[in-house]
Image (cartoon, rainbow, N blue to C red):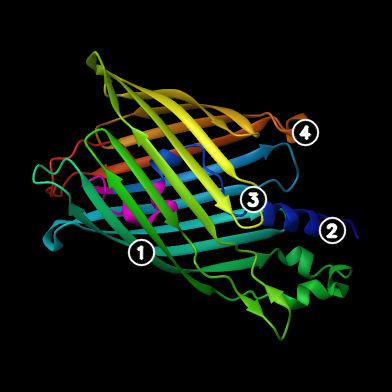
Amino acid sequence: MLILGIVLVTSFVVQSQQRPQFTQYMYNTIAFNPSFAGSRQAMVINLLHRSQWVGIDGAPTTQTLSGHTLIPSLKNVGVGLSVVRDELGFESTTDAFANFSYTIDLDEDQKYRLAFGVRAGATKYDIDEDLLNDPDAGRDDFLNTINFSWLPNAGIGLYIRSESFYLGASLPKIFTFEDNNTGFTSFDRSSVFINGGALIDIRTSNLQLKPSFLIKYTDGAPLSADFSVLFYLNQKLWLGGAYRLGDSFAAIFDFKVTEKFTAGYAYDFITSGLGAFTTGSHEILLSYKFDFLRPVCKCKDLYN
């Protein structure tokens, strides 16, 4: 019965949290907005690992592999792929989505650009075999209603940028699923993401300021809002902090190891009621940028 209790608790958390959280969201936008595909005028590969609420048994862990690139030969077309695996207790969810974007210039100087994005893919929900093979769990009718197959889905996004700021909005998953025969209802709920940021020169090109934000609304869950301020020092080091409304403060450190390779780390100090039971959350991000493509526009890299 203890195992069943854990399942019920984790199911509640899944439905309230919904989409995985990222403290370094400003570097991993392709994970939730397809219109950012190709936005850096290059090919970029990101690998992210997040351990949330360390010290709590069954707390969420998330791994993300994403990549996107510009296709100059098709003019202003970007494509990308994002795979996200989220584990919570005995449960896990895997998302795999292909992304496509098309960008148009809003002025002759290419200072303002607007991108439209679509994504298509599928989500798979799993439960650990240790639970499914447990005799007590076998008597739970809830487990007999779960659909363990890949469920297709699609999403849309919008992204506008200038020489110094960007703003995006997306609906990563449009559809939810219900099976009237078994009573199964997909754990996914529609989520709306709004994100934005700016890159501001401070007196000298050796110091830049980047404020950014991410607001997420999920049907049936509280509003989630992240705000961050980062300083870019000597074109090498991103250093700053972030605040997640009603949840945590974070320190963010990203270092440009080479011109192409960046390594980042974020630590979340939990301020919610969970803070008494956890030492915080940790997030590691590795990013590699390939510069073999010829950019379509002479846009400043806002490092989004």
Q: CA distance from mark 2 to mark 3?
A: 21 Å
Residue drawn at 55 percent across, 39 percent down: 225
Circles 1 and 3 in contact, beta carbons < 8 Å: no
Q: Which residue is mark 1?
A: 118
Of mark 4 and mark 1, the one earlier in the sequence is 1
Q: Amino acid at mark 3?
A: Gln
Q: Nearer the viewer, mark 2 or mark 4?
A: 4
In the picture as drawn, the residue positioned furthest to the top comes out as 203
> Is 185 placed left or right of 229 in the picture?
right
Q: Which residue is mark 3?
A: 17
Q: Amino acid at mark 1?
A: Val
Of mark 1 and mark 2, the one earlier in the sequence is 2
Q: Nearer the viewer, mark 1 or mark 2?
A: 1
Q: Which residue is mark 2?
A: 3
> Is 185 placed left or right of 196 in the picture?
right
* Quadrant in which the C terminus is drawn: top left
Q: Please tell me how many numbered marks the rendered image carries.
A: 4
Q: CA distance from mark 1 to mark 2?
A: 39 Å
The location of residue 182, given as percent across then percent down, is: 73, 82
Q: Which residue is mark 4?
A: 277
Of mark 2 and mark 4, the one earlier in the sequence is 2
| Image: 168 above or below 8 | above
Secondary structure beneath label 4: loop
**Magenta-tinted stretch:** 29-43
